[in-house]
Image (cartoon, rainbow, N blue to C red):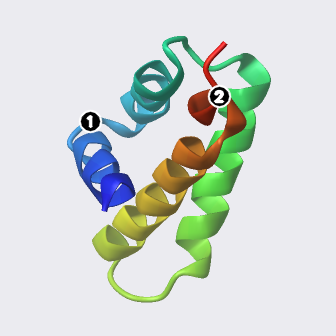
Amino acid sequence: QQAEAFADRLGKLTVFEQLDHAWLSAFGRPPTTKERELANAFTFEMEASLEGPRTQSQREALITFAQSLLCAAEFVVVD
């Protein structure tokens, strides 16, 4: 449910803003160049693999992406 709410907030932004906002919200920092490249590839491939209307595929890809951020050790572990 949290991933869906997070993805819905991201979905209101432009594609270019989504990754930076997601990283800032989850980790308190912008993504590195490598993280941005990997996240772009992940969401693009996830969206391409899903069936149905494009808007639904985009939302499902964002939900999966949001879930991956929320499960990341950097998000879960507090230094």
Q: Is residue 34 above or below residue 7?
A: above
Query: Which quadrant holds the C terminus?
Result: top right
Residue tagged by mark 2?
77
Q: Amino acid at mark 2?
A: Val
Q: CA distance from mark 1 to mark 2?
A: 27 Å
- Residue at figure coordinates x 49%, y 32% from the top left: 19
Q: Residues within 10 Å of mark 1 (few under 14, many from 20)?
A: few
N-term mark: 1 or 2: 1
Going by the picture, which residue comes out furthest to the right?
34
> Along the horizontal axis of the image, is 44 left or right of 61?
right
Residue 67 numbered tag: none
- Residue at figure coordinates x 40%, y 39% from the top left: 15
- Indicate the secondary structure of the residue bearing disc 1: loop
Query: Which quadrant holds the N terminus?
Result: bottom left
Q: Residues within 10 Å of mark 2 (few under 14, many from 20)?
A: few
- Residue at figure coordinates x 40%, y 24% from the top left: 25
| Residue 44 position within the rendered picture, expressed as x and y whole percent measured from the top left | 60, 57
Residue tagged by mark 1?
13
| Residue 16 position within the rendered picture, expressed as x and y whole percent measured from the top left | 43, 30
